[in-house]
Each structure stands twice: as C-alpha cells, then as structure tokens.
Image (spheres, coloured by chain):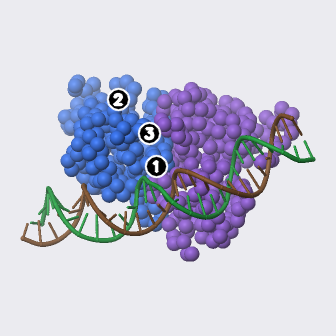
Chain colours: A purple, B blue, C brown, D green
Amino acid sequence: MNHAPLHAAPLLDIRALRSSCSSCSMHQLCLPMGLDESEMQRLDGIIGRRRIARDETLYRIGDKFSALYAVRVGQFKTSQANPDGAQQITGFQMSGELLGMDAISTDTHQCDAMALEDSEICEIPFVRLEELFGDIPTLLRHFHRIMSKEITREQSVILLLGNMRAEQRFAAFLVNLSSRYAARGYSSTSFQLRMTREDIGNYLGLTIESISRLLSKLKKDGMLKVSNREIELVDLPALKRLATGGETCA
Amino acid sequence: MNHAPLHAAPLLDIRALRSSCSSCSMHQLCLPMGLDESEMQRLDGIIGRRRIARDETLYRIGDKFSALYAVRVGQFKTSQANPDGAQQITGFQMSGELLGMDAISTDTHQCDAMALEDSEICEIPFVRLEELFGDIPTLLRHFHRIMSKEITREQSVILLLGNMRAEQRFAAFLVNLSSRYAARGYSSTSFQLRMTREDIGNYLGLTIESISRLLSKLKKDGMLKVSNREIELVDLPALKRLATGGETCA
DNA sequence: CGCGTGGTTGAATCATCTCAAGCATCGTGG
DNA sequence: CCACGATGCTTGAGATGATTCAACCACGCG
C-alpha cells in the first residue's frame, strides 16, 4: 500500500529553519507550549531531528534511556511485551505527542516504539532537558502536565479495557482519533487509519476478526464508511453516544 | 530510631517527630528517597499529615487539585467513572505510594481516592513542592521517576486487561500484592486482602463471581489458602508461572 | 432476632474467540 | 508482463470463557 512520499530533500538551512520549534505547527500542543521566543530557542538548541521509516523502531524494550522523543510528522505505536511473548499495544502517538516517559524511572525503555508510517521525530536528550528545567520554570511545569496527561490517558485505556464491551471500545477508539485529528487541524470525520486492523484489535483487547466485524456492523448501521484504511465517520454524534455508553439506537 | 532534633523542639515534638519523613519507615520508598537530612527536613516542612477513615474519600473526581498525597499508613483505591456511571478501579495504593498525579495536567482530580481501611496520609501542597524543585535537584529527579513509574504501572495494568485471561489476571494481581508487601517488610506469602472481592473484580475487569470461582479453583489446586480476606500463597512460584503465562501444570 | 452486606456456588446464556475458507492488493522474480 | 507468495482483511460456523441470574450461606450489627 502506498503512502504519501516525503517531499524531496530540501537544503540544510531550510530544513533547520522549517524544523525549529517556533516554526513547527505543533508547538502549541507539544513540549514548548507556553514558552516565549528566547526560551523556545534554548529548547531548540538541545533538540535533534531525525527520520524514522515506516516499520522502523525508535527504541526497543531494554534500550538504555537517553532521550524523550516528540513526534513531528507521522504516527507511532508503543507496545509492551508479555513474559510469554505476546505483545500489547499501549498507545498510538500522533504529531506533537511525547514518547519515552515510561523509561525515566528505570533508565531503560519499557516498551517498543515503532513508526506506523514514514515519520520525523524530535530527539530531546533528557539530561540536557533537566538542565533547562532549572532555568525555565514554564518548561518544567508544562513537562509535569504532559506526564500527568499521559497518566490520565492510560487511565482511560484502563477504563476502556476493564469496563466496555467490544462495540463501545471501538467507538471510543474512533472518537478519540477523530478529536485528535481535529486538534491538529484535520477533518474530524474523514481520515486514514495508519494502523492495521490487527494493531487496533491488539490495542482494544479484541481479535482482528472482531474489529473487522465491528467495522462491517457500524457500516451497515450507517455510522461510518470504510474502504481499506480510509474511514469516514458519517454519524459522529451517534458514535460518541456509543462510546459513552449510550444505547445503540438500532 | 529517633534522634534529637537539630533545632528547638516544638511543643508537639513527639507527634511531629514520629510523623516526620526521616522517622518514617517508608522514606526509602517514598518521595524523600535519596534526600540528605537537611533536604528531608525542608520537605517535611511543607507536608501536612492527616487521618482518613475507612470508606472516606481523600478526594473526588472534579475536586480542585492542590496537593499530592503519600500513603503513610493503610491502603487506598483510586477509581475512575465512566460517562454512563460505571466505575473502574485503576489501582490500589499502599504505604509509600503517591496519589493524585493525574490531576496535575488539568488542575482537577480525575479519579476518586478512597481509603480501604483507616489510614494516614501525608499531604504535599503541589505549589510548595514546585518551589522545592528549584533548590533540591535530587527531589525533582526522584519526582520524575515516581511519575514515570506510575506510567509503567498503568501500562502493566493495560497489558493485564488487554492480554490476559481471568486466571492469569488474578494470579498477576496476587503476585503483585505479594511483592509489594515484601518490599515493605511484610510476608510475601501471607497477608490480608484489604479490598472486597467486588473491588478486585472491578480492577481486573471481571465479575465478583469470577473472582470467587478463581479463589476456589486456586485453593483446590493447592496454590493458596483463603479464609475471608486472609490469604496465604502456598505455592508462590506456581502463581508466578501462572501470572507470566506459564502452563497451569494441572 | 432479623436484616444488610459480602461471599460462594450452580445453571444457563452470551459475547467474543478460534478455526477455517476465501478475497484483494502488492511487490518480486522469472 | 505475468505468476506467485505474502500480507491484510472479511466472513461464517462452532467453541468457550466469562457473565448473568438465582439461590443460598456466613457474619456483624442494631
């Protein structure tokens, strides 16, 4: 399956400019949120940028922790491994979202992070970030908010897995994607799934067959249209009702 | 264990001493971990201590966030509410563990925290803690580790809910309790469950009946003994094997 | 004593999984 | 260019693990 090719490699200076925090369209969602221009430049000074091709890993379980990563372009999945070898996807990350915070406590990455499409990341060496914390209180405060937000995000996954039935989980998943695309200026009702059905099933604690059936059922119910990975949420309000436990209205 | 205070003793000296971080048996597990004596005293200076009776809430969803809480004595459960009213327990907290970190991002508590037994907590006003961060880098670094650890803890709950079958979940739950009691100097094989069967079931995404059946089954298999809330893990290695996906050996 | 809460156990039901077959698309090597 | 296998996805039929519903027990408390 094709994905949009990255644009032709530009000259270095242009890249540097285009890839600074202040010029990045995500800077209001990402780590530099709320910083003034000079603070943002200091942060920029420690950040390196890198491309990660589809299916490549950004880091793996057991890797030594040295940096956090912000998704600049593209999407990632993070997954944990069971002792018995089974994988569990714990999240999908979009542009502006931070990866690797679970590694701080042990100095070792606790999950794999893999690109779902050709992506670009900002590498933020943690030791140098810690140096900035002393000088830029706004940055520290926002970092705490980001970690806290990751905790609440995971709590809502726990709620989803512990409490919802299949249809509700899947609706919640779609609604969540929808709002995150919207927050990034994309359509909230029409987008492309970047992950396979298998990834979705794994994330939602369901089998790939269940995901396929759910897609078919919601399509039949007139809530969405699907063609391969292209998806259109025809009745977003109904999906939201489904996700929050409202009746199926069937 | 106690030594004379460095500065003039306050009137409440005995209580204050007994409840200071440096005299608390949890200080190697808790927030002050790694601090020297004077740093610990500064931290102590901002901490208030309080009793919470069984079934009382420490905070509720929607409460304004003002402080983090460390469990000093007793146990808590934290639970989230579904839009449709259903509750989901996201964790059980024991002495030395921190509560309330999910509230930092929104300034509002995202879950309820309720005491499972008569308990004591240390209240850590967050604004004042932030002031200390600038002066005590060790404290900041350790705080980040604690938040990160909460993220990995939740990830393992996600793994449990997304990937394991009932028996495996329950075994993992018991093994987890076991190691946490051990870390606190208690028996790893013999302890009292502080939560109801219903709480356990809710936490593990199972019904109370399933928990009851699992207890009976594991008892019959000779892995444990139960009497009401009193539990003895007769074959901890076997439970660990169960928890990590090993064969039942039945 | 009687009632409420928490827990156990059994039988029947159901949601989701497993197994199986089959289709579409895509990249590759002949 | 075509044949091929690999991958990703869909759909059906049957199996099953966990739930639901129901009855019952044990304990503590007013």
Considering the image in quadrants, where does the N terminus of chain B appear? top left
Q: Nearer the viewer, mark 2 or mark 3?
A: 3
Query: Pointer 1: what residue?
Result: B161
**Residue C11's x, y, as percent?**
31, 66
Residue B73 relative to residue C27: left or right: left
Question: Residue, x 40% and y 49% (percent of image)?
Answer: B166
Query: Pointer 3: what residue?
Result: B245
- Tell me the element at label 2: loop
- Tell me the element at label 1: helix
**Disc 1 with disc 2 on a shared chain:** yes
Which quadrant would residue B81 be assigned to in this image? bottom left
Rate crowding at label 2 as few (under 14), some (14 to 19) or many (20 or more) other CA atoms within 10 Å: some
Considering the image in quadrants, where does the C terminus of chain B appear? top left
- Tell me the element at label 3: loop
Discs 1, 2 touching: Cβ within 8 Å: no
Query: Pointer 2: what residue?
Result: B28
